[in-house]
Amino acid sequence: MAESATKDTVYKVVGVLAGVAIILGGRACFSRISPSPIRAEAPLTGLALIMDAAKNQKAGITVQHWGTVTKLVEDHADGSGEGVGDGSDGTLQKFVVTLENGHVLLMAHDTAIAPRIPLVVDDVVEFRGRYDWNALGGLVYFTHHDPEMVRDDGWIRYKGKVYR
């Protein structure tokens, strides 16, 4: 019986040593493999996307973020059908939003398609819409649902209510 116990102990020790050797050998093997030179880049989101679009003067970029209303601008309601390219009658609620880094955006919310938002200066809004670069910081429009279902819907969230 003592001989059997000794064999079991030897088998256990050999098994443990073999396992350790495999693990260490595997690490040594993998440590010689150099990382791939190709790196997957994470997509830009939120503020990073807006700042990239501003820096590179991009247009037609869908953005989603939040900011503080810093100025209310007079509505544009001439009925000419020349809003911001969305085929509406041109009734736009305009306001300026300042992002957390100080960057400013002009928002153009089409009240012919979406409800008017009862904004005041210093309100915080979340938004999703189309960004176009301009020298003043950029314009965000299509902050409403798309009745023609051609593009993703935009929206503005204000005090828990979504305006689209």
Image: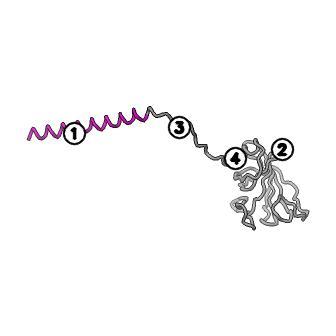
Q: Which residue is mark 2?
A: 135
Query: Which callout, 1 or 3, points to the residue nearer the camera?
Result: 3
Query: Which callout, 4 or 3, points to the residue nearer the camera?
Result: 3
Instruction: Classify 25 as above or below 85.
Output: above
Q: Is residue 105 magenta?
A: no
Taking the spot 31% from the left edge, 34% from the top edge, the residue there is 21
Q: Amino acid at mark 3?
A: Ser
Q: N-terminal of the two: label 1 or label 3?
A: 1
State the image quarter where residue 38 is shown: top right
Q: Residue furthest bottom?
A: 147
- Given residues 100 and 14, the one toward you in this image is 14
Asked if disc 1 and disc 4 are in contact, CB closer than 8 Å, the reply is no
Q: N-terminal of the two: label 4 or label 3?
A: 3
Q: Amino acid at mark 4?
A: Leu
Q: Which residue is mark 4?
A: 49
Q: How is the image coloured?
A: one colour
Q: How far separated are the C-alphas under marks 2 and 4? A: 17 Å
Q: How far separated are the C-alphas under marks 1 and 4? A: 58 Å
Q: Residue 44 location in percent, x, y?
A: 66, 46
Can you tell which mark lies on residue 36? 3
Taking the spot 75% from the left edge, 59% from the top edge, the residue there is 143
Query: Which callout, 3 or 2, points to the residue nearer the camera?
Result: 3
